[in-house]
Amino acid sequence: MIPTIGSKVYIQSYKHDGSLHRTWSQGFVIDADTTRYVVVTNKTWVIEADGRKWYTREPAICFFYTDRWYNIISMIRKSGVYYYCNLASPSLYDQEAIKNIDYDLDVKVYPDGSLDVLDDDEFRDHGSKMGYSDELIRVVEKSMKNLIEVIHEKKSPFNEKEIDRYFQMYLALIKNK
C-alpha cells in the first residue's frame, strides 16, 4: 500500500514493546513509491507518549523508507536545512498512518554538514529493558554506519537543492488544493 500524492496522513512512531512513542496529526504526501514516502509536516501537532503536545515551528520534509532502518526529517529554517535522523524500523503505510518503531539512536545534521550522534545511552537502556535481540542491535548499528556514510557523501536527501525542490512541489500542491 502506497499513500496517494496530495493526501494527508497521520504518522505514528512506536517503541519496541509496542507502546506509542509519538504521533504527528498530519503530514501532506508529496511523493511516494514502493521504497519511500515523502511527507511535509508544517505547523502540525505532535503528541508525545507522556501526553505532551507541541506544534512544529517550521516546514519539514520527512523521508520514510520501506527498506531502510531510519527515517529523516529535514527542517527548513532561516539559517539553513537541519536534518534529524531517527534510527527506526522500515516504515509501512496501512491506510491508517505511516508507522515505524523508533530505536532511540538519532543523528542531527547541521547546515554546515557537521553532525551529532544522540541518545546512545537511551538505545542501550531500552535495549536492555525491552529485550532488543543481538541481531536487532547489529542491524541498527549497521544502519547507523550506513546513514553516516550517506550523510558524508551528501546523497539523497542530504542536499539543499533536493529539499528546495520538494518544498516547491509542496507549495504547488497545496496551492492547487
Image (cartoon, helix red, strand yellow):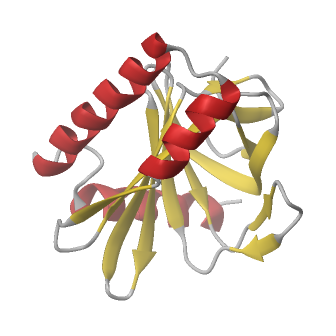
* Quadrant of the drawing holding the C terminus: bottom right
Q: Residue at x 49, y 25 (%)?
A: 33
Q: Is residue 43 visible?
A: yes
Between 93 and 83, the residue placed more toward the observer is 83
Q: Residue at x 36, y 69 (%)?
A: 82
Q: Using the image as rendered, state which of residue 136 and residue 33 is in the foreground.
A: 136
Please name the residue shown 23% across and 32% down the image.
146
Q: Quadrant of the N terminus?
A: top right
69 vs 153, left or right, is: right
Q: Position of residue 118 (x, y in %)?
A: 41, 57
Q: Residue furthest right?
A: 51
Residue farthest toward the top in the current orientation of the protein: 135
| Left or right for 46, reference 150 | right
Question: On the image, which quarter does residue 48 sit in?
Answer: bottom right
Residue 130 higher or lower than 75, as above or below = above
Residue 56 picture quarter: bottom right
